[in-house]
Every structure is written in C-alpha cells, then in structure tokens.
Amino acid sequence: MRTILLFVLTFFSLLPDVSAQTTFYFSEGLVAGPFHQYGREAIYKDELAYALNTNALTSPQDGGTFSTLDQKEITWKAMKADSMHRFRSRDMGNGYLYLTYTTKKAQTALLNVTGNDMVYVNGVPHGGDIYRYGWMDIPVVLKKGKNEFYVRVGRFGSYGGIVAKLDFPEKPVYLNTADLTMPHVVPTLQNDSLWVGLVVVNTSSKPLTDLTIISDVMGNKMSVEVPAVPALSTRKVGVLLNGSKATNIGKQTVNLSLLQSGKMLDTKSIELETIATGKQYSRTFVSDIDGTVQYYSVAPQLNPKPGVAPALFFSVHGAEVQAINQARAYKPKDWGVLVAPTNRRPRGFNWEDWGRLDALEVLAIAKKNYSPDPEKIYLTGHSMGGHGTWFLGATYPGNWAAIAPCAGYPTLSSYGSHDGMIPDSASSPMEAMLLRASNPSNVLALVQNYKPLGVYINHGDADRTVSVEYARQMKKLLAGFHPDFSYYEYPGGSHWYGDISVDWPPLFDFFSWHTLAKDTATAANHVDFTTANPGVSGRMKWATIHQQQEPLRFSRIVLDRDQAKNRITGTTQNVATLSLDLGAFAPGTEVKIQLDSVAEVPYSVKSPNETIFLKKEDTWKVAGKPDARQKGTRRSGTLKEPFNHRMVFVYATGGSAAEKAWALDKAKFDMESWYYRGNGAVDLIADTEFDPQRYPDRGVVLYGNATNNAAWPKLLADCPIQVANGTLTVGTRTFSGNNLAAYFVWPRQDSEVASVAVVSGTGLIGMQAANANQYFSGGSGFPDFMIFTNDMLRSGVTGVKMAGFYNNDWSLKESETVVSQ
C-alpha cells in the first residue's frame, strides 16, 4: 500500500467580518498515514474515505490515532507551513490534507490547493491541482462554524509541497484569464474568426444562463453566446476574436465583456500575439470530443514549392511540454510541415484515451489545412511523446510511413507518472477481468503492427528520466522480426540534450527514405494487424475487424491478397466479424477467400470498391453488415466510451436530500476533473430537464439509480443491469444492501454512436463508494460493467462483486463475466 499522509490544518477566524478578507493561507496542520492506494486501474483503496462514507471518521487531533483494517494504529503529528505557505516533508507523498476554517457566518469562497489529487470539502469531493498549475479555483460554500477539508496528496505531493488558501472574490461572477487557450495571428492565414478558451467563474447560488461574451480587437468586435455555467462552478468557454487588423508583429490588447441578458457582469483584457511569417505558431479549433476550444502548434515548411505537396511530420510532446514549445524545438524543413497536437493538456492522458482522440482530431485538421503528400506522413515524439509515438504507431499503423520515438517508454505498465503504472499481472480472475480493459494500452502485444512502418529509435545513453533500457527492450523485440528499423544511442545524452533530442538530422533522413504504401500497391497485399478493441482501432489497409469473439482480448488478422490468382488467404484470432475491401478486384471477378484453413468462401465482385462482410461461426460465411446498434468500430463498449461524444452529465433530483446532494456533487467533481485533466467542459443538467431529442448522438453520464434519477427509464429501460435503492440486478443475479456501487455502460437505443455511462449505487454508502474517478487517468481500464461495495475501499479486489463485458449484441455473456464467491 502506498504511503499516505494526512495533514490537518486548523484555523479559527478571529476577524469580526471574514468576508472582508481577500486571501487566507492555511499555516498549521497534522500529518499521518498510510491510508489509500490509487492508480491506473478500476480498483482503489482508501481507508479514510471508507470511514468518511460510513460516518466513522472523527476530526483528528495531535497525537490521536486511526485504526486500519489490518489493526495498525496511525498517529497524527503536528506540522507547519514554511514562509512560502508550503507544507513540505520527505514523508508527505501520498497524503491527505485536512483543513478546518471557522467562520461566523455562511459565505462563498474560492478554494485553491496546489499539489493535491482531490479534496473533500465538508464531505463533498472536488477536483485537485495535481501538477501545481495554480489556476484550479473551486467555488465552495462555507457553512457557519467549522468547515472541514480533507485534501488527498499523491505520491509526488512532497516534491513541491502543498499550498492551501481561500480567496474571497469581490464579484460573484467574473472572467478568469489565468488558464487561456490562445491562437496566434499569422499574417498568411485567415484571422477573422479565431477561437479562444477562457474560464467563467460562478460563485453564486444560481446557474448562469443567457450569457454572451463580446471581444474587441482594435475595433473589430465579435459576440458569441456562452453555454450555461452551473451554480458554484467554473466553466471553460469559447470566445471568438477578429484579429484581421492585428497585422503588426507583437502583442495586441483584446478587451472582453461578459454580459447576461445584456447586463454587464465583468470585463477583462488579454493579449493576442501576431507571429512573423515563417515562425512557429499555434492555432485553435473546436473539438468534437466535448465542443471546447483546443489548440495545436505548427513549424511551417521552409520555402514551400508551388504545386509540390509537403510531407507531414506529426510530433507529440512530453509531459509538461506545451505544444508550441514542441514545435519550436524543430527548425523548419524545406520538404515538410510539422504539426504538434496538445494531448488536451501538457500532461493530459499520456496520449491514450482522449489524448489519442486529440491526436486524431489534429491529424485530420493537418491533412485538411496543409494537404500533405499522403505517402509522406511521419510520427515522432519525445519522452511521454515517445510513448505516444510507440502507442499511436502501433494502434494506427496504417497512418504513418515511419515513426521515430525519442527517449520514450513503450507501455504504462512499465513506466508510470503521477497516476502510477498499469499493473502487469493480476492476483485473481476478477482483477484479470478488470485489467483486460487496459489491453489497448499494451504496446508490447501490438508490436507486430510495426511491420509495415519504418522505425527509428532515438535515445540518450545517459538518460536518467526514461532509461535507455526501454529503447534497448524495443530494439530487441524489433530485431526478431522487423526488416526496416534503425537504432541510435546519443553518447552521453541525458533525457533532453538540446533540440537535437528531437530535431536530429539522421532521423529526418530516415523519414525521407520511407513512403506510405497505397492500398492498391503490391506492398499492401499483406496485412498483419492486432487490436484489443475495434472501437479504438479496427482497420488496417483493406481489412477491418468489426467484432470480437472475446471482448478486449487481442484480435489478430494475418492476410495475403493475391491479385493475380484472385485469392485472399490467411488466419484470424479472436475475430467474429471481418470486412474486406475488394477494390483491388474488378467487378465480375470470382474471388476465393480462405481463412483459418476452413471451407473456402467464393465471392463474385459485384461493384467497384465493394466491401464484403464475413462472419465466423463454425466456418466463415459472407454476411450482411452488422447492425449499427451492435458492438463495432463506432461503438464497442467500456465505461470510458460515452465520454467521447460531447457528453452531458445528468444528475438525479429524486430520493433523499443526501442522495440528491451526492448526485449533483459527484457530477461536479467529474466536471472539475475533466476540466483540469482534459482542458474541457460539459453540460450539466438535472434528470427532469433531460430530453433525448435535445441531445442527439451525445454521450450521457448518468448519476443516480432507477429510484431517484428520472432519466433512467428514458435511457436504461431495456438494460440488463438495474439499480434501485436496496437492490441491484445483473441479468438473473440480484445483490442486496445499501453499500453497492456500479459503473457500467449501455448503448443509447436512439443512436448508432452514443452510449450512457452510469455511476450508481443502491444507497448513499454505495454511491459514495463510486466517488473516485480514475477513469480520467490515461490508460486506466474499466470494463463494460463493474459492481462493487464500499468494502473495496478497504479490502481491494475482494470488494468487487461482479465485472465483465457484454456480447456483441449487448446481451450478457456468462463466459465474459466474473462473479466473486
């Protein structure tokens, strides 16, 4: 169990009117531990949270003790902040910070804690500022008397210390410009409709609606309607700027005005920078993931040749590196343009999950904007971006002519960050089922996908951050089968030894020797492709895996196309439905298909570029296209998938007062966490306001159960998993009690792409057990459904009652379910 420390900071206000304060820093506390274990998996432990959920947690005192499940007595110790307001200790990693603030009246404040994973405010969970950015302001209501704050500190919490403060804003609603997502004005590009992302803060008790933000750039004004901002929350919103007059190189002032129904609420000024032609720059776009403003950066091509399509160098950055700094590490190239996506944040999702989707979005934008030669698209990256190169290269091998990971690690099971590592083995069948959902992150299992790519491995031999042994591991693996890779260790090279760590001439020479084979070329007649989830990646060249026999186990196809003999032969593993693009064969051609040494399937090509579907039962047979509402490449399950489609959070308003409060508080906790990790925002609505027709093809995250959430019958009436107060049923199995929690996914029946993620419980204790949100940790695996009790917080996997995956038609599949004994 990881070491956790609990900090107790206590302040009793001596001022007659606390609301007159601007900022208050906490300065005293207590420390104790260990208590919890969080990581990149669905299972988590937290004995302090367990006690909080069961009302067994008492306010600690110096010298007091806490008894753990294994009968250990943990003692609280006093601690004080230093002159910079930091709580620092060598023993502080993986800690809890408990603050109390006493006030003579109820009031609203902004809580700002840096270096923490999350914080309980009077028992309510809120997001944390893991990486100490400093802009994570959380509106909270301070009740009259003593207010309690339990701040969870991660394993790196001691490195920079913990700073905790309360701010008392002068205005209840205002613009916060500390966390901007900004484009550059580029003279050679269109600049009259530039998107900017900035935060609206609402410390009032009412939601903000009918909002408008007006921007003014040198007299050019633009107006945009702003989505609703819930009470006591913040939301990052998009603002349009007209920068067409900002032609002088340098920075120009932008005036912003926030209005509600025409009434001025706040004004702020920001700076818009104009970049000289030929210099690296950033541009913004509205993401299809959640409708928020994101950005990418570009190192433009040097002296482009008219009529000659450039190469595209796609570069993914390392942890804490902004995309613009990634682009600035490269000198412009005369034969291509370099584009760097963001991963949604400087750390984001390790280029997995929504970082992966961000990369795909920016890749599509780059192809549209720069019209690169489709045969000359290359992938590279450094550190975390080196991992991103290994991962994106293996997951989408058909996208790249060559890849070049620099100072990278292959998997999150061998190298982790703040969220730790994905476990590389399971202690029980239940944990194995849960970890199976992480298989798409297993680069080592996808290594054969590198076969059609050129691979250049670049690593400093003195790297103490990411050991060169990771590069040597991949070199050894590739040496066993790969005909076209190059390996270089930079003598004496640390993790970063200057821009040549990435802008290495031999690396780009290697790229220039490689082209991406067209599907119709002879070189594309062989396909060897592995995937763990067709919903993540199913297509390679002219073959697509649509459905699996066993969900989230590895599926592989090894196929050969002989155009002279009109034959397709090969083998498959864990494939239920497969499609083949027959565009290489003329209409009327009799194509013979033999897979897995079973009966040959003859097929007469009927039309140009025809695609046929094959389904495997006892043998392979030609079949119709799978029903779009079944699992497939557009929607294939796991709990995380609904977060991909402009998700809307729907919270329960029925049940007891405590249940109502939990549903809204948990939705806000997820909203805060998504903003922090994903530079994102979501629509938050009550169950009584949810109308499926108003939110077509959008993912839904539902908080509550059938007893208290009015949207349940609209979305989950035919789901085999039903949760109500006191009972939970999964097919024919029934679980009883008030301490059961559930995470599960279910397809929206009115959509071919969108699903519902359900965060539920059979009572308040069960609902609180579902508070943790590791599903926002990059690479963490969550199956289609998972049933657990509050006991998981103390005993780990033994507290999980049931977990598994649906069949391709979304029915329960006994063989894909594990039930604890």
Image: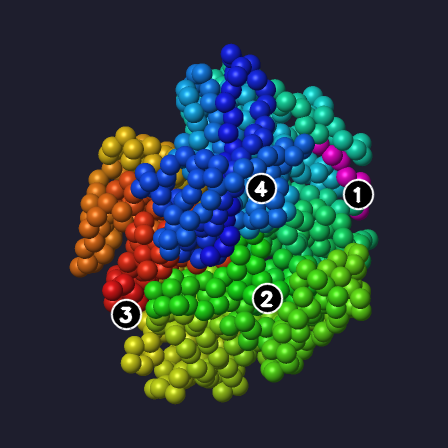
Q: Does the magenta stretch include residue 274?
A: yes
Q: Which of marks 1 and 4 is nearer the N terminus?
A: 4
Image spot of residue 786 (x, y percent): 33, 56
Callout 2–callout 3 Cβ contact below 8 Å:
no
Q: Which of marks 2 and 3 is nearer the N terminus?
A: 2
Q: Earlier in the sequence, mark 2 or mark 4?
A: 4
Magenta span of residues:
272-278
Q: Which of marks 1 and 2 is nearer the N terminus?
A: 1
Question: Which-is-in-front pick, marks 1 and 2?
Answer: 2
Provide the residue designation for mark 2.
410
- The residue located at (76%, 53%) in the rendering is 329
Mark 3 surroundings: few (<14), some (14-19) or many (≥20) residues within 10 A? few
Check disc 4 and report its element: helix, strand or loop. loop
Q: Distance from label 1 to label 4 (Cα)? A: 39 Å
- The residue located at (75%, 46%) in the rendering is 280
Mark 1 surroundings: few (<14), some (14-19) or many (≥20) residues within 10 A? some
Image spot of residue 219 (x, y percent): 69, 21
Q: Which of marks 4 and 3 is nearer the N terminus?
A: 4
Check disc 1 and report its element: helix, strand or loop. loop
Image spot of residue 1 (x, y percent): 46, 57
Provide the residue designation for mark 4.
115
Provide the residue designation for mark 1.
277
Closer to us: 334 or 671:
671
What amino acid is labelled 2 in the image? Pro
In the displayed structure image, the side of residue 23 where residue 794 appears, left or right: left
What amino acid is labelled 1 in the image? Thr
Q: Distance from label 2 to label 3 (Cα)? A: 31 Å
